[in-house]
Amino acid sequence: MAAPARSSRRPHARTAGIVRRDEGPTVGPLVAVEIHPEPLLQAAWRARPALRGTPLVVALASGGRVVAVCPLATGTGVVRGQSVAQARLRCPTLVVVPPDPLAAALLYAEMLHALAAFSPIVEAADADADAGVAYLDTHGLAALWGMDPVRWDGGVVARAIVRALATRGIDARAGAGPTRVVARALARRMDAGEPHALGGDAAMAFLRALPLDDPALGLTPASIAALRDSGSRRPARWPRCRRRG
């Protein structure tokens, strides 16, 4: 399923098929892929495989703030932003490791390399690297997957990507939709099952139902407060929210 190559100006994305988000508009459907748990944590797992079954956090220093939390630690009440002391009060068996930004960046680059096999257009914005997020444009790929172009929603690509990354030891979630916002919001709602995909009216209804504080919308706390003060509670009453997707 290899796709035509396209050059990149991103230092960490010198891989066939990787493009900057500002190199032109995408057509869609789009697939959002997110390394989950976040790259810093998965990099720590790679360096210390035995810790996968242990409550683990990544913290800036022994007395610093927690910047990444594994699911086991989350289940005990540990969250990002806590001090190590606060986290250990909630989980006495907690293991704390320092962040390795280089290893996390290499993990993200490995994901981008894998994604380039699925689409000739993989978007990798600088702001998405720390979160481990990338977007694929699946326009025109229906025939390659034996699908009806009229019914094509990119869902089969999202599912194949999650499986392919798993074989590389990268845990990820994905979603497919007509905009980046819809695709990423669907990815963030992926449970233990397979990725979700929506198109047409169903996708727009899903978008309108999103709360303003959904991370996929990318709104700052100040923007959320201003919109709520104006009477808006969901994107249905704020059409511009689609602008970023």
Image (cartoon, helix red, strand yellow):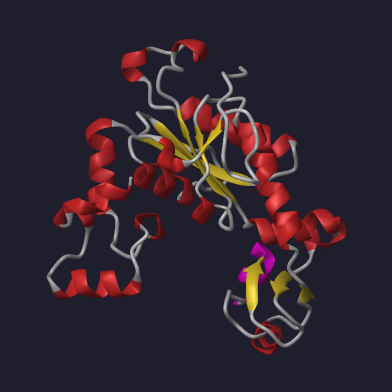
Q: Quadrant of residue 61?
A: bottom right
Segment tinted magenta in the rendering: 70-77
Q: Nearer the viewer, residue 183 or 198?
A: 183
Q: Is any part of residue 75 visible from this angle?
A: no
Q: Residue furthest front?
A: 9
* Quarter of the N terminus within the rendering: top right
Apparent side of residue 25 relative to residue 119 in the rendered image (left or right): left
The percent coordinates of residue 113 (x first, y second) are 66, 34
Q: What residue is shown at x 28% (from left), y 63% (from top)?
A: 212
The percent coordinates of residue 154 (x first, y second) are 44, 27
Q: What residue is shown at x 33% (from left), y 35% (from top)?
A: 178
Image: 188 above or below 32: below
Image: 243 above or below 78: above
Q: Quadrant of residue 39?
A: bottom right
Apparent side of residue 188 relative to residue 232 in the rendered image (left or right): right
The percent coordinates of residue 218 (x first, y second) are 37, 59
Q: Nearer the viewer, residue 36 or 220?
A: 220
Q: Is 73 covered by the magenta stretch?
A: yes
